[in-house]
Image: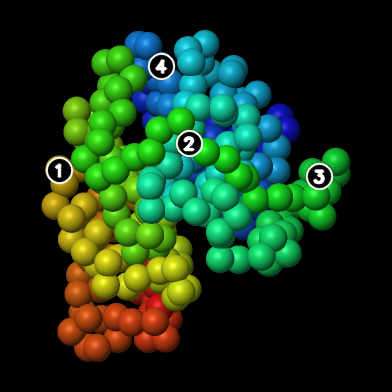
């Protein structure tokens, strides 16, 4: 576990725990307030992220998922208090649209797994959240406030978290440097564009994605939005529209 998570500091109250040994390179953000801490996404669940979190905070910790995909909720079992969007509650009770066998194949793909990890025993986290989130809700940590932005497109209940005071947008899978996915039946390319339109106008200082490179500027969000606009104008913003490469990012429709 000690070499599974890579810790990097965003500021004195914010750290990111990253899974660089897996091809998805998932990032989980630990935010510390005066009264509580919040972990945005819990990764793949290959190793116990709670051990890493407890080294960084002595305050009560809740977990929140940007969305209910396996690579964002794998460590939720270590956090009895977790939050999720109401649109994806069925995915937490057996309704996830992929089989566990398909998920296991992706977990094991292009990955240097720990010797004691048995992928055949990997399961999708199931449970009931302590709090169901909706657009506009606020999460108070004591001196830090996050606003919930419902940003569907990649998934029905996808959320970004906006910390206006610091200008941080925790963007989940809405935008990152790499291939964005809006090609599955549970995705919606038109809603994806609406979510990009909504978030691109925020006065961001930092864009904090859920995957791959951390050194991306807020301008990436505007570029992605503009490309989606162009695809819509061309009639290609739809399932089956193709894969479009823009250099440092791409989208599969």
Residue holding disc 3: 117
Q: Callout 3: 10 Å neighbours few (<14), some, many (20+)?
A: few
Q: Is mark 2 on a helix, strand or loop?
A: loop
Q: Quadrant of residue 12?
A: top left
Residue holding disc 2: 129
**Placement of the C terminus among the 4 image quadrants:** bottom left
Q: What element carries label 4?
A: loop
Q: Earlier in the sequence, mark 2 or mark 4?
A: 4
Mark carried by residue 89: none
C-alpha span from label 2 to label 3: 27 Å
Q: Is residue 193 above or below residue 243?
A: above
Pick the front one: 44 or 250: 44
Residue drawn where x is 29% and y is 43% of the image:
134
Q: Is mark 1 on a helix, strand or loop?
A: loop
Q: Is residue 96 above or below residue 41?
A: below
Disc 2 versus disc 3: nearer the observer: 2
Disc 4 versus disc 1: nearer the observer: 4
Q: In this view, does 53 lie above or below 185?
A: above
Q: Callout 4: 10 Å neighbours few (<14), some, many (20+)?
A: some
Q: In which quarter of the image is residue 239?
A: bottom left
Residue drawn where x is 56% and y is 59% of the image:
95
Residue holding disc 4: 36
Disc 2 versus disc 4: nearer the observer: 2
**C-beta proximity under 8 Å, tags 4 and 3:** no
Disc 2 versus disc 1: nearer the observer: 2
Q: Callout 1: 10 Å neighbours few (<14), some, many (20+)?
A: few
Pick the front one: 224 or 47: 47
**Placement of the N terminus among the 4 image quadrants:** top right
Mark carried by residue 203: 1
């Amino acid at each position: 576990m000690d070499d599974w998570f890579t810790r990097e500091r965003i500021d004195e109250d914010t750290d990111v725990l990253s899974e660089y040994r897996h091809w998805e390179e998932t990032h989980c953000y630990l935010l510390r307030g005066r009264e509580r801490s919040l972990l945005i996404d819990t990764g793949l669940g290959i190793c116990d992220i709670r051990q890493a979190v407890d080294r960084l905070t002595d305050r009560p910790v809740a977990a929140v998922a940007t969305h209910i995909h396996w690579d964002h909720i794998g460590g939720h079992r270590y956090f009895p208090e977790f939050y999720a969007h109401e649109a994806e509650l069925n995915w937490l009770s057996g309704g996830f649209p992929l089989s566990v066998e398909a998920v296991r194949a992706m977990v094991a793909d292009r990955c240097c797994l720990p010797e004691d990890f048995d992928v055949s025993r990997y399961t999708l986290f199931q449970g009931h959240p302590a709090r169901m989130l909706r657009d506009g809700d606020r999460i108070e940590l004591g001196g830090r406030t996050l606003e919930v932005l419902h940003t569907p497109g990649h998934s029905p209940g996808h959320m970004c978290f906006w910390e206006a005071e610091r200008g941080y947008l925790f963007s989940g899978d809405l935008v990152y440097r790499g291939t964005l996915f809006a090609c599955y039946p549970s995705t919606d390319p038109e809603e994806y564009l609406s979510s990009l339109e909504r978030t691109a106008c925020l006065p961001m200082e930092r864009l904090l994605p859920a995957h791959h490179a951390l050194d991306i500027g807020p301008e990436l969000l505007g570029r992605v939005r503009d490309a989606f606009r162009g695809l819509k104008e061309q009639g290609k913003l739809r399932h089956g529209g193709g894969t479009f490469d823009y250099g440092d990012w791409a989208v599969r429709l």
